[in-house]
Amino acid sequence: MRTIEIQLFGALREAEPSARLAVESAATHVGQLRKELAVAMAAWPPQARALLPRSAFASATTVLRDADRLPEDGRLALLPPVSGG
């Protein structure tokens, strides 16, 4: 297990006043972490929880896919989908 630090953006910030999550995780890949977060976010408003499956994870330099390994430093950003014109 290690601590994963996740910075939240967009509508996800409204669900967590600190705009950050620190989770203890055994996950090695993004998809595993996404599943763990779905459980950890159970107390969040339904609208925020619904964003998780469609949100992107990113390291300091790269947008990550579910099959990608988590960064060694354990720091991620969670970016909800956006729309605009």
Image (spheres, rainbow, N blue to C red):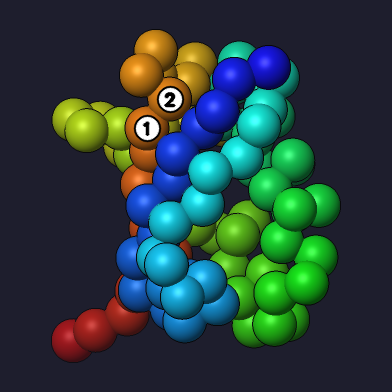
Secondary structure at badge 2 equals: loop
Residue that label 2 marks: 74
Residue that label 1 marks: 75
Residue at coordinates 68% horizontally, 17% vertically from top-left?
1
Q: In which quarter of the image is the C terminus?
A: bottom left
Q: Where is residue 64 in the image (x, y as percent from the top left)?
A: 40, 32
Question: Does residue 58 show up?
Answer: yes
Mark 2 touches mark 1? (CB < 8 Å): yes
Amino acid on which the number 1 mark rests in the picture: Arg
Vertical side of 65 occupied by 40: above or below = below
Q: Is residue 79 left or right of residue 65?
A: left
Vertical side of 9 occupied by 26: above or below = above
Residue at coordinates 75% horizontally, 53% vertically from top-left?
40
Neighbours of disc 2 within 10 Å: few (<14), some (14-19), many (20+): some
* Residue 61 vs residue 17, the one in the foreground: 17
Question: Does residue 67 show up?
Answer: no
Q: Where is residue 72 in the image (x, y as percent from the top left)?
A: 39, 13
Vertical side of 21 occupied by 49: above or below = below
Amino acid on which the number 2 mark rests in the picture: Gly
Q: Where is residue 84 in the image (x, y as percent from the top left)?
A: 24, 84
Point out which mark residue 38 bears. Answer: none
* Residue 44 vs residue 18, the one in the foreground: 18
Quarter of the image for residue 31 reads top right
Q: In this view, does 10 lie to the left or right of 62?
A: right
Neighbours of disc 1 within 10 Å: few (<14), some (14-19), many (20+): some
Secondary structure at badge 1 equals: strand
* Residue 24 vs residue 68, the one in the foreground: 24
Vertical side of 59 occupied by 67: above or below = above
Q: Where is residue 42 in the image (x, y as percent from the top left)?
A: 80, 65
Q: Distance between the residues labelled 2 and 1?
A: 4 Å
